[in-house]
Image (cartoon, rainbow, N blue to C red):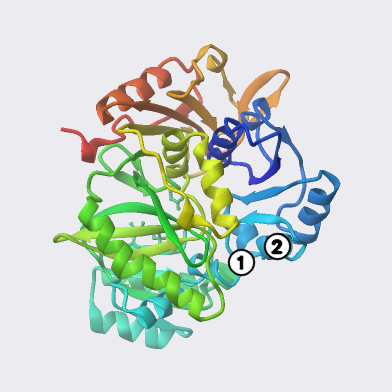
Amino acid sequence: MNILILGSGGREHALAWAVKQNPKCDRLIVAPGNAGIAMLAECADINILDGATVVTFCEENAIDFVIVGPEAPLAAGVADACRAAGLLTFGPSAAAARLEASKAFTKEICDACAAPTAGYARFTEAAPARAYIAEKGAPIVVKADGLAAGKGVIVAMTEAEALAAIDDMFGGEYGAAGAEVVIEEFMAGEEASFFILTDGTHALPIGTAQDHKRVGDGDTGPNTGGMGAYSPAPVLTEALQQQAMEEIVLPTIAEMALRGTPYQGVLYAGLMIENGKARLVEYNARFGDPECQVLMMRLGAQALDLMLATAEGRLDQVQVNWGDDHALTVVMAAQGYPGGYLKGSQIRGLEELPEDSRHMVFHAGTATRDAQIIATGGRVLNVTARGETLQQARDAAYALVDRIDWPGGFCRRDIGWRALP
Ligand code: AMP
Ligand code: GLY
């Protein structure tokens, strides 16, 4: 079959890498793609936020299956447009993607199905929001309701920080995303990610992972999109996964169906684990980035079969074949990230690295210039390896990192620390 993947990051490189290994895949196109993706698929520079453009492209290229990677096209209704045109599509409708696109909506769903999450209140004006913060005290969490490229959440350790966040949000710093604000109870504990495929009715867990949000070793410095991940996350035990399914995920899926907006695609549940219980931090309507890279490294070719079963509404008929393995990815970022960073620096040594079912460098922000790979984004490479143990996966990933000649880049040296002795 002919397959189109939408997106241009390390997540989409990993999806393309897994899909390409499946013999069902004939032609693979990624739009817009990047320099790494171009080594294994065709890339097409189209506007992936416009449903009509994507549908026309699919018709012209006889596409049989569309996989939507990032949240922006989902929130823009691109999966709806594809399905309306009769295209088999992996990814939720805009109405269902509100689980990521609106934090207030997610809270409403949690209320409706009694899913455990942080206590909260919602505001559209600054004065009552400020009064609420004064009443509750710090630590407290202030969130812009809408999509803010991962920047709309302020975990305020002091009241002053929380009040400043209110000023920023109602002052327009986050645009329309900040027109409504959710203020939440601060949850202590350890965070982990849980990934579930759902066709709207059936649900199939496909793995756990842990991300590293801070830029510096030991979880220090500013927040980023994620500096590395590993899978599985031992903190999410079988018992916790079961609790999360029963109390959070399945009730959410049922509530979405009940409202006439069934959720189809991957549901990414960000969980906080404290005292042996998981509570929901947030949902995302897509695979995590860089968590997808470790999930795909572990799932391989079967990822395509699972996504097809999701889109075709037959998830009850498939299962995941797990190896007893571990995967770890180290994000290499451009110097300066997550602040202003260097663009256009040259990366050498990639062509000499192994690329097989245990080692892969996924590209997140690269381009080719004069036959050389250059960095174009903040997060640039996802150096990924698999092993029988987490330690082996980590050693293999850092051995690859050390062979990459890129003075313009840096990475954390402690990915996996929470799960390693
Ligand atoms: P989000 O964009 O919702 O993922 O939030 C970004 C990060 O903020 C999460 O990954 C958590 O680390 C943190 N966070 C969000 N909500 C809370 C909360 N209620 N308590 C503690 N930390 C939170
Ligand atoms: N790695 C966090 C995310 O994809 O939202």
Q: Residue at x 31, y 84 (%)?
A: 132
Q: Position of residue 409 (x, y in %)?
A: 48, 28
The three-letter code of the residue at mark 1 reads Ser
Name the kind of residue labelled 2 in the image: Arg
Most extreme residue toward the top is 352
Q: Is residue 60 above or below residue 249?
A: above
Q: Quadrant of residue 161?
A: bottom left
Picture disc at residue 83 = 2
Is residue 165 in view? no
Q: Position of residue 43 (x, y in %)?
A: 73, 36
For label 2, the SS is helix
Q: Which residue is rendered at x = 48% and y = 34% of the image? A: 300
Can you say whether 357 is above or below 284 in the image? above
Q: Position of residue 3 (x, y in %)?
A: 69, 42
Q: In the image, 167: left or right of 14?
A: left
Residue at 83% across, 51% down: 59
Along the line of sight, the residue nearer the viewer: 261 or 382 = 261
Above/below status of 322 relative to 223: above
Q: Position of residue 209 (x, y in %)?
A: 35, 45
Query: Is ligand 2 within 8 Å of the beta carbon of the residue shown at mark 1?
Result: no
Label 1 sits on residue: 93
Q: Can residue 230 be seen in the rendering of this structure?
A: yes
Disc 2 crowd, CA 10 A, few/some/many (<14, 14-19, 20+)? some
Seen at 54% across and 71% down, the residue is 262
Crowd class of label 1 (few under 14; some 14 to 19; many from 20; radius 10 Å): many
Judged by depth in the image, the label closer to the viewer, 2 or 1, is 2
Position of the N terminus by quadrant: top right
Q: Are marks 2 and 1 in contact (CB under 8 Å)?
A: yes
Q: Is residue 277 left or right of residue 290?
A: left
